[in-house]
Amino acid sequence: MASAAPNLIVHSLREQIREHILEGIISGRWKPGERIVERRIAAELQVSQTPVREALRELESLRLIESAPNKGVRVRSLTADDLKESYPVRAGLEQVAAELAAERLAEDPSALEREVTALREADAALDGEAQVRHTVAFHQELVRAAGNAVLTHAWHSLGIEVWTTLSIRWLSPAPRAYAEEHQEIVDAFLRRDPEITTIVKEHVLSCAPQV
C-alpha cells in the first residue's frame, strides 16, 4: 500500500485498510448487499490478505458488514435507526466521564481547547474529514480525562470514529457549527456548571442522525 506509507507512523495498516473499506461503503462503491472480496482489496492495495481480514472483522463487529458461510462478506443494509443505536449508550458513558473528569477539566481544559481550535478551522473550510477527526478527538480527550480504564475501553469498543463518520458524512441533514457546540462544553467545565453531566449527555444525543 505504497500511497499510504507516510501515514503508517500514525495509523496502523489495519486502520488504513478499514478506512479504505469504510470510505467505499460511504461513497457507494460497495452497495448494501454487495459482496466485498478480501483478495481483491489486498491486490488493489498491494498488501497481504491478513490485515484486510482483520479490518473486515472489525467492521463486522461494528455491524457494518456481515458474513455467511459460502456467501462471503457483504455490506449490511444500514438505516438511520441502525446508526442511532449506539448514541444512548455513548451518551451514558460520556455522562459518567464528565462527572469523573469535571474537576480536572475545570483546572486544565487545554486538551479540549486544542480540538475546538482545530474544529473552527475545519468548520470554516467545510472540511468534513477534519470535522470528524477533531470531533472524535474532543470526546476522546473528555473520556481520557476521566482516568478510568474500564470506561475508556467501553467507549472505544463502540467504534465511535466509524459511527461518527457515517453520521456526519452520510445522514447529517445540514452543516453544523461543530466548534461552537464543543466550545459550549468547554465553557461549562470552566465555570464548574453543576449540570455538566446533563450538558454532555444531551450534546451526544443531539449528534445522533435524524430520522
Image: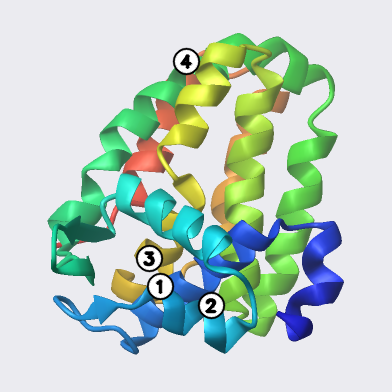
Q: Residue tagged by mark 2?
A: 42
The C terminus, quarter of image: bottom left
Q: Position of residue 45 (x, y in %)?
A: 60, 82
Badge 2 vs badge 4, beta-carbon distance below 8 Å:
no
Q: Position of residue 178 (x, y in %)?
A: 56, 60
Q: Which mark is residue 38?
A: 1
Q: Residue tagged by mark 4?
A: 96
| CA distance for labels 3 and 1 | 22 Å
Please identify the quarter of the rendering in which residue 205 is found: top left
Q: Amino acid at mark 3?
A: Leu
Q: Amino acid at mark 1?
A: Glu
Asked if residue 61 is positioned above or below residue 145 in the image, the reply reads below
Circle 3 SS class: helix
Q: Earlier in the sequence, mark 2 or mark 4?
A: 2
Circle 1 SS class: helix
| CA distance for labels 2 and 4 | 41 Å
User: Dot 4, how many residues are within 10 Å of its Cα: few (below 14), some (14-19), or many (20+)?
Assistant: some
| CA distance for labels 4 and 3 | 25 Å
Q: Residue tagged by mark 3?
A: 166
User: Which of these two is toward me, 197 or 20?
Assistant: 20
Asked if residue 190 is positioned above or below residue 128 in the image, the reply reads above
Q: Which mark is residue 103?
A: none
Circle 2 SS class: helix
Please identify the quarter of the rendering in which residue 201 is found: top left
Q: Amino acid at mark 2?
A: Ala
Task: Give the residue at x 71% y 53%.
Answer: 116
The N terminus, quarter of image: bottom right
Answer left or right for 35 relative to 2: left
Q: Earlier in the sequence, mark 1 or mark 4?
A: 1
Task: Give the residue at x 34% y 89%.
Answer: 29
